[in-house]
Image (tube, grey):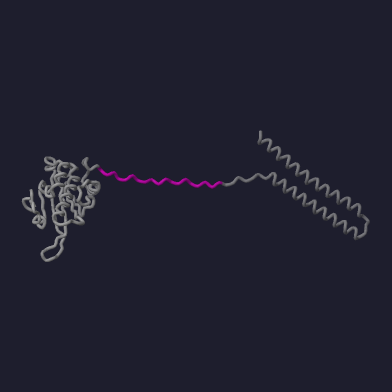
């Protein structure tokens, strides 16, 4: 109903402007006719003045008519619809899911990726080195060999302490996987020979087998024994080696009968 009312109103406005334009035109023509009759037979100067007056009236009438027509066009013009730019929706970036890390304690495959992932979260003992950053890692079937080098050791006895605690932490982490059959941990150190030359040599080496772990080892209790005695980890290993420079400096050799066994 409102739309019909608006449309009728617009039509009335258009007719109004048409009649105004027509009225202005009629007045102008009528004025010219009167001027022509009044000045007929007059002198030349009178004719010139009258012509100028008629010309001015005609110009004003034409201007008024033009304005009226322009107003009519403006009134009847339909406004254009603005253009709205629609931006394309952003495409969601699909992030691939990370490769799941196999659970080491649940028969995870023995691979370098799985071994390193387990070592990064391994619980070591104090004074041990960073288990997640071995110098070397070797996997031969179900046998794993790890090599570490401590950044600092305060003498030969402290070197044995660091080696024992690092060896314990690495072996406990690796042998939690029932697929692993043996683990060897090698500790390196810088040694000065009698001639003053510094060389990197094995400080300790220890190997622990699956059969020994399953039949004898209780890790929580062993952690206490290794913390209390820096020689104990090597005494319960299937085989071990301790550098002669360390062994010779031990005042109490304890369970270490010799500096190496089964190597």
From the viewer's side, name the closer residue of 129 and 3: 129
Tell me if residue 181 comes above or below residue 41 in the rendering.
Answer: above
Tell me if residue 237 comes above or below residue 41 in the rendering.
Answer: above
Q: What stretch is highlighted in magenta?
A: 84-102
Q: Describe residue 22's horizontal placement relative to residue 187 as left or right.
A: right
Q: Is residue 229 visible?
A: yes
Tell me if residue 52 comes above or below residue 224 in the rendering.
Answer: below
Q: Is residue 140 visible?
A: no
* Residue 93 is one of the magenta-drawn residues: yes
From the viewer's side, name the closer residue of 258 and 180: 258
Horizontal and vertical percent for residue 75? Answer: 70, 44
- Most distant residue in the left direction: 257
- Most distant residue in the front direction: 251
Horizontal and vertical percent for residue 219? Answer: 16, 42
Horizontal and vertical percent for residue 106? Answer: 22, 40
* Residue 239 is one of the magenta-drawn residues: no
Quadrant in the picture for residue 109: top left
From the viewer's side, name the closer residue of 102 and 241: 241
Query: In percent of the image, x 47 and y 45: which residue is there?
Result: 89
Type of secondary structure dominating the magenta stretch: loop
From the viewer's side, name the closer residue of 255 and 4: 255
Quadrant for the N terminus, please: top right
Q: Describe residue 141's horizontal placement relative to residue 74 as left or right.
A: left
Q: How many marks?
A: 0
- Most distant residue in the bottom direction: 195
Horizontal and vertical percent for residue 209? Answer: 13, 45
């Amino acid at each position: 109903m409102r739309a019909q009312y608006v449309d009728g109103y617009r039509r009335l406005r258009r007719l109004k402007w048409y009649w105004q334009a027509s009225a202005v035109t009629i007045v102008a023509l009528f004025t010219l006719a009167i001027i022509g009759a009044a000045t007929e037979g007059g002198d030349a100067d009178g004719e010139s003045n009258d012509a100028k007056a008629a010309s001015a009236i005609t110009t004003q009438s034409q201007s008024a008519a033009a304005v009226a027509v322009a107003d009519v066009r403006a009134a009847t013009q339909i406004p254009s619809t603005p253009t709205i730019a629609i931006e394309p929706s952003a495409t969601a970036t699909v992030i691939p899911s990370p490769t799941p890390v196999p659970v080491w304690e649940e028969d995870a495959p023995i691979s370098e990726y799985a071994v390193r992932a387990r070592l990064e979260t391994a619980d070591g003992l104090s004074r041990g080195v960073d288990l997640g950053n071995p110098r070397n890692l070797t996997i031969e079937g179900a046998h794993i060999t790890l090599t570490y080098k401590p950044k600092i050791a305060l003498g030969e006895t402290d070197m044995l302490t660091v080696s024992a605690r690092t060896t314990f932490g690495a072996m406990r982490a690796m042998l939690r996987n029932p697929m692993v059959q043996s683990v060897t941990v090698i500790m390196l150190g810088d040694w000065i020979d009698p001639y003053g030359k510094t060389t990197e040599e094995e400080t300790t080496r220890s190997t622990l087998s699956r059969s020994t772990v399953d039949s004898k080892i209780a890790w929580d209790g062993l952690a206490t024994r290794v913390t209390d005695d820096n020689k104990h980890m090597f005494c319960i290993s299937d085989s071990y080696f301790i550098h002669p420079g360390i062994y010779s400096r031990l005042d109490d050799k304890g369970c270490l009968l010799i500096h190496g066994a089964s190597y």
